[in-house]
Image (spheres, rainbow, N blue to C red):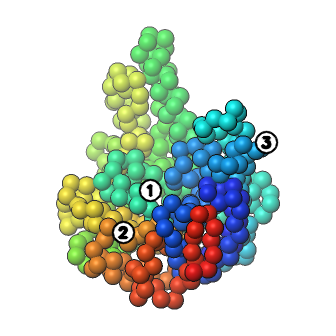
C-alpha cells in the first residue's frame, strides 16, 4: 500500500501543492518550520481523518485562506492498494474570519472516497498508516491517555467495530457522568445508573477485548523491533493493564466475562463515582505498561532510550497492521534520528527494513548519507516541495 499522489490546497502552510511520490523510501529535507511535518500530517489525515497535532480542525486551514468568503482546506490522495487504486479526500470547511481577528475559526470536515461522500467509519482504514513524531516519547513517559490513544488509533484503522464501540462508549461515559452529577446534587436516584452501567459494560467489553488482543500481538514485534533499533542493548516489554480489580489475562478473549467484570466493578464503585461526579472505572482509565530490562521505562529511561522505545512501538504497530490487513501500511517518520547517539542512529537506519512506502523528514541530509542511499529526496522550503 502506498500514496502515489498527494494534493494539498490551503492546508497548513501549503497554499497549493501537487506531489508525485514513489514506492520505497523518500527523504523530505529542509530547515525547521518549512512544512516537512505538515506533509506527514496530511498523509496521516487521509488514513485516520484526524490530525495528531491540531487542537481544532480550523488549525488545518492556511492562515491566508481564513479571510476568504469560504475558507477551505483540502487534502487528497491517490492510493495504490493490493485490490486496486483508491482516491481519498478530506475537506476542512471553516467559517470566514470576521473583523480581521487573529483567532482560528470553527470548522468541520467532509470526507470522500472515490468522489463519494462517506462517514468517518467508512473512511478510516481505507489507507493504513503509522506516524512517528518527536512527541511520541510521551508513549513512554507520558500519561496513560497517550498509550490508550496509541492503541485506539491503530485499532480504529483495523477494525470498524472498534471505531463504532469507542464512539458509542464516549457518549455513554458522558451521559453517565452527567447522571452522576445529578445524583450528587440530589436530582436523580442511584438506581438510574443501572441502564448506563449496562451500556458502558457492553461497549467497554468490546474495547478491552480488542485492546488486550492488540497488545498481545504488539508485544513480540515491539521486543524484536527494539532489539534492532537499540543495537540489542536493552529488552522492551509491554503489557495491557485494564482498570479492573483482579484482571485475569486468561479472560482477555472472553467478551462476556469482561462485560460481567465491568458490570461488577461499576456497581462496586458507585459510591466512589457519585462522590467524584465521574466514572472512575472502565477502559477510558486503562494503561499499557512499558519496561526496559524489567524496569518501568518512565522511571529511568533517558531521552534516547525513550525515543528508541517509542520507535519500536510504532514499528510493531506497522507489523500488526500488515498482519491484520494483508499488506504493509505507509510508515511516516518525523525527525526520527534527533537526540540519538551515533550508535543508535546507525542501529535505527539499519532496522528500518523494507516497506511499500517510507517517508522520513530531516533537517540534516548527511545523517542519511549511508543508511538509505537508494531513497528519493525532496527539498521542502516555505510550503513548496521540489526534487533535492
Side of 94 where 267 appears, left or right: left
Q: Point out the image quarter for the C terminus.
A: bottom right
Q: Point out the image quarter for the N terminus.
A: bottom right
Q: Nearer the viewer, residue 31 or 259?
A: 31
Side of 238 where 127 appears, left or right: right
Tag shown at residue 338: 2
Tag shown at residue 69: 3
Q: Secondary structure at mark 2?
A: loop
Q: Residue at x 25, y 55 (%)?
A: 298
Of labels 3 and 2, the one closer to you: 3
Q: Secondary structure at mark 3?
A: loop
Side of 260 where 142 appears, left or right: left
**How many numbered markers are drawn?**
3
Q: Earlier in the sequence, mark 2 or mark 1?
A: 1
Q: Earlier in the sequence, mark 3 or mark 1?
A: 3
Q: What residue is shown with label 1?
A: 150
Instruction: Find the distance from the CA under tag 3 to the CA under tag 2.
Output: 41 Å
Q: Residue at x 38, y 42 (%)?
A: 285
Q: Nearer the viewer, residue 109 or 323?
A: 109
Amino acid at each position: 500500500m502506498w500514496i502515489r499522489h498527494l494534493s494539498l490546497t490551503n492546508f497548513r502552510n501549503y497554499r497549493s501543492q501537487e506531489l508525485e511520490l514513489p514506492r520505497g523510501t523518500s527523504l523530505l529535507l529542509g530547515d525547521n518550520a518549512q512544512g516537512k511535518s505538515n506533509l506527514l500530517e496530511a498523509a496521516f489525515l487521509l488514513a485516520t481523518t484526524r490530525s495528531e497535532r491540531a487542537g481544532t480542525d480550523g488549525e488545518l486551514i492556511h492562515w491566508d485562506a481564513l479571510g476568504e468568503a469560504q475558507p477551505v482546506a483540502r487534502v487528497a490522495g491517490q492510493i495504490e492498494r493490493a485490490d486496486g487504486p483508491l482516491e481519498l479526500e478530506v475537506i476542512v470547511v471553516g467559517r470566514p474570519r470576521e473583523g480581521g481577528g487573529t483567532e482560528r475559526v470553527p470548522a468541520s470536515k467532509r470526507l470522500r472516497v472515490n468522489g463519494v461522500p462517506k462517514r468517518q467509519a467508512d473512511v478510516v482504514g481505507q489507507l493504513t498508516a503509522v506516524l512517528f513524531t518527536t512527541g511520541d516519547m510521551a508513549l513512554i513517559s507520558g500519561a496513560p491517555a497517550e498509550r490508550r490513544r496509541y492503541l485506539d488509533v491503530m485499532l480504529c484503522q483495523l477494525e470498524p467495530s472498534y471505531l463504532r464501540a469507542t464512539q458509542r462508549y464516549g457518549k455513554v461515559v458522558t451521559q453517565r457522568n452527567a447522571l452522576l452529577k445529578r445524583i450528587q446534587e440530589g436530582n436523580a436516584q442511584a438506581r438510574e445508573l443501572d441502564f448506563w452501567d449496562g451500556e458502558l459494560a457492553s461497549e467497554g467489553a468490546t474495547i478491552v477485548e480488542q485492546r488486550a488482543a492488540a497488545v498481545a500481538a504488539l508485544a513480540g514485534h515491539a521486543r524484536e523491533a527494539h532489539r534492532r533499533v537499540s543495537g540489542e542493548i536493552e529488552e522492551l516489554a509491554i503489557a495491557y493493564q485494564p482498570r479492573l480489580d483482579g484482571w485475569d489475562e486468561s479472560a482477555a478473549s472472553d467478551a462476556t466475562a469482561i462485560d460481567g467484570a465491568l458490570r461488577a466493578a461499576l456497581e462496586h464503585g458507585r459510591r466512589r463515582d457519585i462522590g467524584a461526579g465521574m466514572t472512575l472505572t472502565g477502559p477510558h482509565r486503562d494503561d499499557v505498561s512499558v519496561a526496559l530490562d524489567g524496569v518501568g521505562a518512565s522511571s529511568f529511561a533517558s531521552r534516547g532510550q525513550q525515543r528508541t522505545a517509542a520507535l519500536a512501538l510504532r514499528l510493531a504497530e506497522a507489523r500488526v497492521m500488515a498482519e491484520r490487513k494483508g499488506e504493509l501500511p505507509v510508515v511516516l517518520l518525523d525527525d526520527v534520528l534527533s537526540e540519538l547517539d551515533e550508535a543508535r542512529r546507525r542501529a535505527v537506519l539499519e532496522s528500518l527494513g523494507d516497506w511499500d512506502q517510507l517517508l522520513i523528514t530531516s533537517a540534516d541530509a548527511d545523517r542519511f548519507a549511508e543508511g538509505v542511499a537508494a531513497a528519493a529526496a525532496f527539498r521542502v522550503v516555505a510550503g513548496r516541495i521540489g526534487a533535492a
